[in-house]
């Protein structure tokens, strides 16, 4: 089992690196946008007016990381943040039209690529991926719920 886990670890690391480097440069040529920023734009495009704390929870990131992420997106004109009139300690986040345009353009490009990639797989490979990924996510979430760290923590301190 240890060899399987190590093999899966390397496959997942390769998947994340390939997706991040290949997709971000193709989707946002010449623009420095991280996967976390893209995920934040996705959340804001679907959940208008959430707080920074809610965004941190949805992304599985520390509040301080989200604070920097939000400041960067705001300075790039991709979101706005305003104090909540009912609770001045909270900022409410809104995606801008430029942020929405960027997110939706990226989503279209990524969807097209996912279709192309899965079309290059055999039906058995697609079935295996469709069954295996939800099972892996379920195990990761269960592990996190048992207090073994966030589903996003790798627990190894590095690769």
Image (cartoon, grey):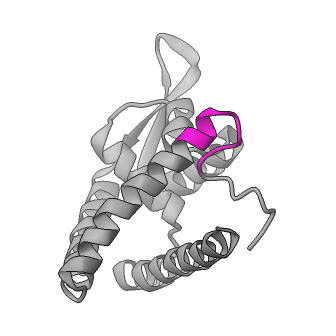
Give the residues in magenta.
Answer: 142-151
Is residue 69 positioned above or below 62 on the image? below
Front position in the image: 106 or 96: 106
The C terminus - image quarter: bottom right
Residue 8 sits in which quadrant?
bottom right
Is residue 92 positioned above or below 87 on the image? below
Q: Position of residue 14 (x, y in %)?
A: 55, 81
Q: Residue at x 67, y 48 (%)?
A: 65
Which residue sits furthest top?
86
- Magenta span has 85? no
Q: Is 134 placed left or right of 139 in the picture?
A: left
Front position in the image: 124 or 159: 124
The number of numbered discs placed on residues in the rendered structure image is 0
**Residue 80, can we see it?**
yes
Q: Position of residue 62 (x, y in %)?
A: 67, 42
Q: Residue at x 47, y 56 (%)?
A: 136
Which residue sits furthest bottom?
120
Residue 46 sits in which quadrant?
top left
The N terminus - image quarter: bottom right
Q: Is 85 placed left or right of 115 in the picture?
A: right
Q: Is 126 placed left or right of 149 in the picture?
A: left
Q: Is 42 placed left or right of 120 in the picture?
A: right
Which residue sits furthest right?
157
């Amino acid at each position: 089992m240890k060899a399987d886990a190590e093999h899966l670890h390397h496959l997942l690391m390769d998947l994340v690196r390939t997706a991040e480097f290949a997709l971000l440069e193709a989707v946002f040529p010449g623009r420095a946008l991280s996967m976390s920023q893209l995920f934040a734009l996705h959340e804001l495009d679907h959940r208008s007016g959430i707080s920074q704390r809610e965004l941190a929870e949805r992304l599985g990131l520390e509040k301080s990381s989200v604070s920097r992420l939000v400041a960067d997106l705001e300075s790039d004109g991709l979101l706005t943040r305003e104090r909540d009139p009912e609770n001045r300690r909270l900022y409410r986040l809104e995606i801008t039209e430029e942020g929405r345009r960027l997110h939706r353009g990226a989503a279209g490009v990524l969807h097209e690529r996912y279709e192309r990639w899965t079309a290059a797989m055999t039906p058995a490979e697609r079935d295996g991926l469709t069954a295996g990924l939800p099972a892996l996510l379920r195990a990761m979430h269960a592990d996190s719920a048992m207090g073994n760290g966030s589903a996003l923590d790798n627990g190894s301190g590095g690769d």
